[in-house]
Image (tube, helix red, strand yellow):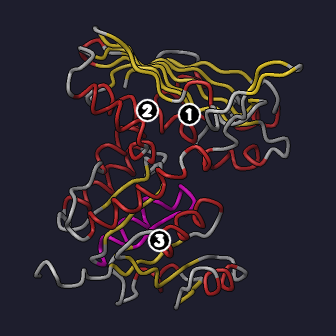
């Protein structure tokens, strides 16, 4: 193709039009160059009008098989329940299409390995998992600095994902299928820690937690606040904190300590750089939720997926990365429930 030739359009379908699915769909339909969102799949018939009127989607179906087997698609984005991820990713790969799936790849490392094996049989197809923080500008800057050795050798990561309290208890109802707080929230921090530390292998984990506000979690062995420590080969360590109960907003923060300095990303959960001082005190507005904090990263993530599918960029992360994140998350969850350290 000559430099003046038009770039081929990547025809994409999406499965799942819930809260995060709509975020991805709107980016694909309106903000990612070289992409045409042609198909949408949802179990909810009510999503049909939204897909047609807001996204300009030509084909809508409630049948996942119809989406997967659509002959005019190059790639499919999966924003479906985690329990479906492994089988759906495999189905997409086996039809010869590229696939993006939201995190985690699966709640069981064995299912991740099964997907990974199929992915290896299709090396020409992109299979990408949505670890969105890798596409946040601040985290990318931090990782580049560490990889360049600017702060010496990183040996400790302290990372947290803390959500504003939701009095409705939505996540309590979702808890039986979420895999627990560490798989649902801390899997992002787990992936970040490996990435920022240079991808060492985890060898042992210990976790503890408490229920501060939502006793309904006890029935499924979950907590609304949890702490975990993970030990890696070579001596590096990671400490994770996950919370569902913050009063002020969403707070994602990561600190990396190295032999010649440290980095902090996201300190204070500030929405902007405006600090107000008056008779009530000194204050600033805090980030409301995960989407507000990582809105730009969600767009960059989908732009990267499109470029990877077109062969213009190498995928930034692999199915093996997702498998390792699940493997560590499972060990942390087992430790939370047993009260004992877990060998990974």
Q: Is residue 225 above or below residue 2?
A: above
Q: Are marks 1 and 2 in contact (CB under 8 Å)?
A: yes
- Could you give the CA–CA distance between mark 1 and mark 3, rounded to whole angstroms? 29 Å
Expressed as whole percent of the image width and height from the top left, the position of residue 273 reads 61, 33
Image quadrant in which the C terminus is located: top left
Sequence-first tag of 3 and 2:
3
Sequence-first tag of 1 and 3:
3
- Could you give the CA–CA distance between mark 1 and mark 2, rounded to whole angstroms? 9 Å
Residue, far right:
279
What residue is drawn where x is 53% and y is 56%? Answer: 83
Residue 28, disc:
3
Residue, far top:
259
What residue is drawn where x is 48% and y is 54%? Answer: 298
Q: Which residue is mark 2?
A: 190
Label 3 vs label 2, nearer the camera: 3
The stretch of residues the image draws in magenta is: 76-95
**Mark 3 neighbour class, 10 Å CA radius: few under 14, some 14 to 19, many 20 or more:** many
- Could you give the CA–CA distance between mark 3 and mark 2, rounded to whole angstroms? 27 Å
Image quadrant in which the N terminus is located: bottom left
What residue is drawn where x is 70% and y is 42%? Answer: 288
* Residue 205 seen by the camera: no
Sequence-first tag of 1 and 2:
1
Q: Secondary structure at mark 3?
A: helix
Q: Is residue 84 magenta?
A: yes
Q: Which residue is mark 1?
A: 182
* Residue 280 seen by the camera: yes
Residue, far front:
278
Q: Secondary structure at mark 2?
A: helix
**Left of 79 or right of it: where is 259?**
left
């Amino acid at each position: 193709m000559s430099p003046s030739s038009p770039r081929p359009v990547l025809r994409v379908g999406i499965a799942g039009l819930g809260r995060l699915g709509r975020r991805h769909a709107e980016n694909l339909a309106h903000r990612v160059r070289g992409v045409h969102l042609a198909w949408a799949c949802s179990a909810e018939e009510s999503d049909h009008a939204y897909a047609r009127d807001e996204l300009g989607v030509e084909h809508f179906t409630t049948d996942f098989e119809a989406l997967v087997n659509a002959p005019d698609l190059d790639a499919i984005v999966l924003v479906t329940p985690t329990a479906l991820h492994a089988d759906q990713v495999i189905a997409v790969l086996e039809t010869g299409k590229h696939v993006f799936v939201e995190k985690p790849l699966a709640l069981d490392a064995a299912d991740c390995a099964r997907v990974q094996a199929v992915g290896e049989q299709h090396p020409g197809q992109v299979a990408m998992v949505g670890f969105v923080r890798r596409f946040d500008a601040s985290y990318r800057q931090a990782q580049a600095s560490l990889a360049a050795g600017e702060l010496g050798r990183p040996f400790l990561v302290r990372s947290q994902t803390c959500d504003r309290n939701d009095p409705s208890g939505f996540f309590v109802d979702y808890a039986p299928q979420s895999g627990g707080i560490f798989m649902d929230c801390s899997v992002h921090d787990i992936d970040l820690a490996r990435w920022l530390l240079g991808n060492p292998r985890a060898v042992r984990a210990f976790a503890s937690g408490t229920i501060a506000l939502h006793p309904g979690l006890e029935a499924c062995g979950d907590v609304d606040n949890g702490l975990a420590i993970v030990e890696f080969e070579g001596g590096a360590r990671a400490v994770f904190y996950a919370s569902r109960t913050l009063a002020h907003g969403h707070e994602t923060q990561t600190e990396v300590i190295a032999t010649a300095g440290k980095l902090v990303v996201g300190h204070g959960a500030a929405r902007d750089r405006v600090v107000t001082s008056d008779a009530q005190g000194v204050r600033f507005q805090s980030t409301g939720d995960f989407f507000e904090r990582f809105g730009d990263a969600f767009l960059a993530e989908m732009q990267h997926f499109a470029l990877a599918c077109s062969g213009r960029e190498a995928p930034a992360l692999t199915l093996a990365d997702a498998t390792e994140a699940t493997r560590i998350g499972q060990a942390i969850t087992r430790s939370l429930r047993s009260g004992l350290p877990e060998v990974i």
